Image (spheres, rainbow, N blue to C red):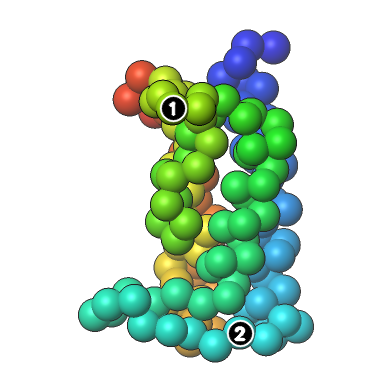
Amino acid sequence: MSDVAARAAFAKTLARKAGALGRRYFRRELAFAPQEKGPQDWISAADLAVDDLIRGELARVFPDDAMPGEEGGISGGPAGGASDALWAVDPIDGAINFIHGVRYWCVSIVFTVDGAQRP
C-alpha cells in the first residue's frame, strides 16, 4: 500500500470516528454552547473536541505531517521545518447548521503533498 493509499484509508476511518464524536454533540448527548468568532463565523466545544481528536490521531500515526487547522493553528511536521505532507481539516464543516440543529454538516479532512490534493 502506498503512503497516499495508507493515508486515505486512515482518513476515512478517522473521519468516521470524528463524525461519531460530532454526532454526540449534535444530538445533545454532550453539552455545548456556541461562541461567535466573527460575523457569521461560529465555534463550539464540538468543533474543539473533534479538532483535538483529529490532531491527536494524526500526530500519533503521521507525526511528520503538518496540520494547519481551522480551530487550533498549525501542528505536527518536523521540528523547525515545513512538511511536504499537509492535512487541512474543518472539524465541523457547516457549523452554523450544526449549531442550529440542521443535519447538513460534516467533518472535512484533506491531504496534500507538495501543494497537490491527493485522493
Q: Position of residue 16 (x, y in %)?
A: 69, 51
Residue at label 1?
Answer: 80
Mark 2 element type: loop
Image position of 113 with respect to 100: above or below = above
Q: Which of 94 and 47 lies nearest the eye of the viewer?
A: 47
From this viewpoint, is residue 3 visible? yes
From this viewpoint, is residue 111 visible? no
Check residue 13 in the rendering and tell me which mark sits there, or answer none.
Answer: none
Mark 1 element type: loop
Image position of 87 with respect to 117: above or below = below
Residue at label 2?
Answer: 32
Q: Position of residue 75 (x, y in %)?
A: 50, 42
Whether the residues at callouts 1 and 2 have beta carbons within 8 Å, the answer is no
Furthest-front residue in view?
80
Q: Is residue 43 left or right of residue 7?
A: left
Residue occupying image coordinates x 71% and y 36%:
60
Residue occupying image coordinates x 39% and y 77%:
42
Image-quadrant location for residue 8: top right
Q: Is residue 71 left or right of residue 16?
A: left
Residue occupying image coordinates x 63% and y 11%:
2
Q: Position of residue 15 (x, y in %)?
A: 63, 49
Label 1 neighbour load within 10 Å: few <14, some 14-19, many 20+: few
Specify the amino acid type for callout 1. Answer: Gly
Q: Is residue 36 left or right of residue 105?
A: left
Tell me the distance, in whole angstroms, between the alpha carbons under discs 1 and 2. Answer: 36 Å
Lower sequence index among marks 1 and 2:
2
Label 2 neighbour load within 10 Å: few <14, some 14-19, many 20+: some
Specify the amino acid type for callout 2. Answer: Phe
Question: Which mark's residue is nearer the viewer, 1 or 2?
Answer: 1
Q: Position of residue 114 (x, y in %)?
A: 36, 19
Furthest-right residue in view?
29
Image position of 15 with respect to 94: above or below = above
